[in-house]
Amino acid sequence: MTPAPSLQDLIETVRRDAGNDELDQLATARAMVNDLSETGDALLGHYVDRARRSGRSWTEISNTLGVTKQAVHKRWAGPSIEGFERFTTRARTCLSAAGDAARAMGHGYVGTEHLLLGLYAEPESIAARILTEAGTGPKAVRAAVVARLSAIATPAATERAAPPAGELPRTPRANAALGAAVAEALQLGHNYIGTEHLLLGLYHDSGSISAQVLAELGPDKQAAHAKVVEILADFTSPAT
């Protein structure tokens, strides 16, 4: 098996990217660990999905991974797009677009970064309006995503196989972001999940690529949440 990057390799990468300041090195190392974790989740998710598509049972997969069947099912058996009955048409379009974004980047999984890119598929949606009005466009987001992934890519990782046919598996963090979107909708008293809730859900895990990109480019979650409330208030206020 091709060896993973050694600790010394990672230390040298941090030094090269961050310079000599100790706090800059610490911040860079933290970002690298988060990105490696997301990539590792995506790698496992890719092969879990391949095993499932080949007819392997959840019991066989859990035994191979050394965890319980319940644990592996909970982590990787996210709902299919067809299962999102409470999601608006625009939100479902954005979920489909996330898969398209992943394929366009040569990825065999849907991560939080792809969910973020998918929000631009509906330019008139609340989420896209909030992002573009904050000056965060799709080209800037894609460039930031590519930069983060490139910083942790190994030579073997750049030799990508074609993404599998059908719906791509989501990483655990992507599934968690969708769960957070549902929670955001409930907190706002909504009985549906729209693009605005998807956007807010992408801030949920500060270690995810989506949250890191949003922290870099803006808006922050507080500003995004305030804008969601403002826009929805305009929809529901009586005409004057």
Image (tube, rainbow, N blue to C red):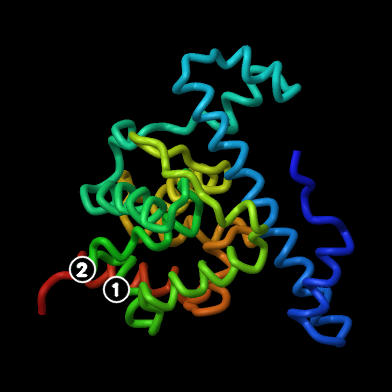
**Between residues 62 and 175, which one lies in front from this camera angle?**
62
Badge 1 density bin: few <14, some 14–19, many ≥20, Cα 10 Å: many
From the top left corner, tell me how far across and down residue 59 is, in percent: 62, 12
**Between residues 179 and 6, which one lies in front from this camera angle?**
6
Q: How many marks?
A: 2
* Residue at 63%, 13% in the rendered image: 60
**In what element is the residue under mark 1?**
helix
Task: Report if the CB atoms under discs 1 and 2 are less than 8 Å apart.
Answer: yes
Checking the image for residue 219, the label placed there is: none
Dividing the picture into quadrants, the one containing residue 232 is: bottom left
Badge 2 density bin: few <14, some 14–19, many ≥20, Cα 10 Å: few
> Which badge, 1 or 2, is on the more N-terminal residue?
2
Q: Amino acid at mark 2?
A: Glu
Cα separation, mark 1 vs mark 2, equals 6 Å
From the top left corner, tell me how far across and down residue 23 is, in percent: 84, 81
From the top left corner, tell me how far across and down residue 124 is, in percent: 20, 68
Residue under pointer 1: 129
Residue under pointer 2: 124
